[in-house]
Amino acid sequence: MQPRGVVHALATACVAVLLIGMVRGQTSGGHFVREVPWSGNGVWLKADTHTHTRFSDGARTVDEVLNRATVYGCDAVAVTDHTDLNLQAATREYFDAIEKARARRPNMIVFAGVEWNIPPGNGQEHVTVLVAPELEKQLTTFKQLFDDSNRSSRDRKSAAEGLRWLAANATSTDGIAPVAVYEHPSRRAERSIDNVADMKAWRAVNDIVIGFAGAPGHQGTTPIGTYAHKEVPIDRWDPVAARIGDAWDTVLRDGVDVWAAYAPSDFHSANLADQADYWPGQFSETWVYAPERSSAGVLRALHAGSFFADHGRIVREAELHVTAPGLSRPAGAGEVISVPKTTEVTVDLSIKVPAEAWRPGRNHIDLVEIIAIDQAGASVIAQGRPGEAGPAITKTVPVPDGGIVFRARGFSILETRTRLAFYTNPVRVVVNQ
């Protein structure tokens, strides 16, 4: 059982669902262990939670970034400038500029977040941090205490201390906890699988780090994502997510539910030689299924795993479902269900394919896959062209005694043989004891 550490808005609902199931005697059939309370009643919001401005190493102002994000259909954008102590993220001027930009855009959800140099990387490992808007100025103290870039050994603090501080000082009164994401996890890694240790260590503290940036930003650069060390993106996605059985699947196999269906722009600049990034929402998309159109709604959805991501604007409303006898409805991304031994479950993926996408011409999805992770490992258990009617793909699977986790992905295969991909977050199935 994974440690929780932070009690956010989902916890009460999850406990209530489990207790109701026990009272009704549902342990003999399928029931929810962790549920997304707004399933079937939410709203889809296009988000980019990792962008930069002139307050650190970006080339554009806050207004310029948000103006272009509006053009490309973003409902929510986070400005997340670097927390190096010599830069201006989390300063009074930073918050003032973002607050004025927010006031000018009442229809856009705007976060003033940061990109944290997480210890002990001395500025080499980055984690974006988002908090409820009323608590954003707490990030000034957080930066001063916990940023790890160019710290002396005497002043260095641990990642665990920083995560505990965020839980204690940046959780809202209505229980909305901070959200943190491990950005471009394999950019400097010797092996992408080595990211497992970091993720498990952070999650042993609390659940503020919700997962990996499965797709790094800087998709318009050469090399893609600025991955110039030993690991390189696979179909533009980080190997932690794109390589079956790598870090994401390993953490899921070991019982820790983290998310990686996340594709930010990491926007820094545009129209500069060899340093061009796509604008927020122009190429990379993260679609959150939130309980409401608000900052709290976005944070709750990110914590819950209620989101998917794609490159090239190729897909809409990508939803992975697991159906089991006894469930009141199919389970979706981020949820956990429990079933009796010898149960078979049905896994299906539904998608909407817009006629137009990032590239000129007819948009298309050419291949969809269902991935399963159990104690024996991870593998693609179903693949093919998406169905023309009904679900894109369906598979019935017997649940092993040790349980199973499902996630899904799909590809638009271009004439150059380049593959643009989308990924869903997982659904976990455990076996009644």
Image (cartoon, rainbow, N blue to C red):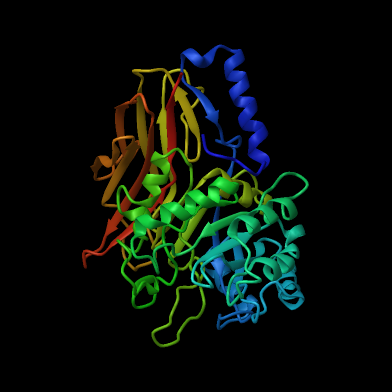
Q: Residue furthest bottom?
A: 273
Q: Residue at x 47, y 60 (%)?
A: 285
Whether residue 261 can be seen here = no
Whether residue 374 can be seen here = yes
- Measuring from the top left, give residue 213's x and y in whole percent: 46, 59
Rendered position, 183 above or below 248: below
- Measuring from the top left, give residue 30's x and y in whole percent: 46, 20
For residue 168, side relative to residue 355 (left or right): right
Q: Residue at x 36, y 35 (%)?
A: 348
For residue 262, side relative to residue 159 (left or right): left
- Measuring from the top left, give residue 185's x and y in whole percent: 43, 62
The answer to which of 63 and 143 lies nearer the viewer is 143
Rendered position, 387 above or below 259: above
Q: Residue at x 47, y 13 (%)?
A: 28
The answer to which of 205 and 267 lies nearer the viewer is 205
Total numbered badges shown on the rendered structure: 0
The answer to which of 301 and 18 lies nearer the viewer is 18
- Measuring from the top left, give residue 109's x and y in whole percent: 65, 60
Rendered position, 181 above or below 326: below
Rendered position, 397 above or below 115: above
For residue 422, side relative to residue 74 (left or right): left
Residue 160, picture quadrant: bottom right
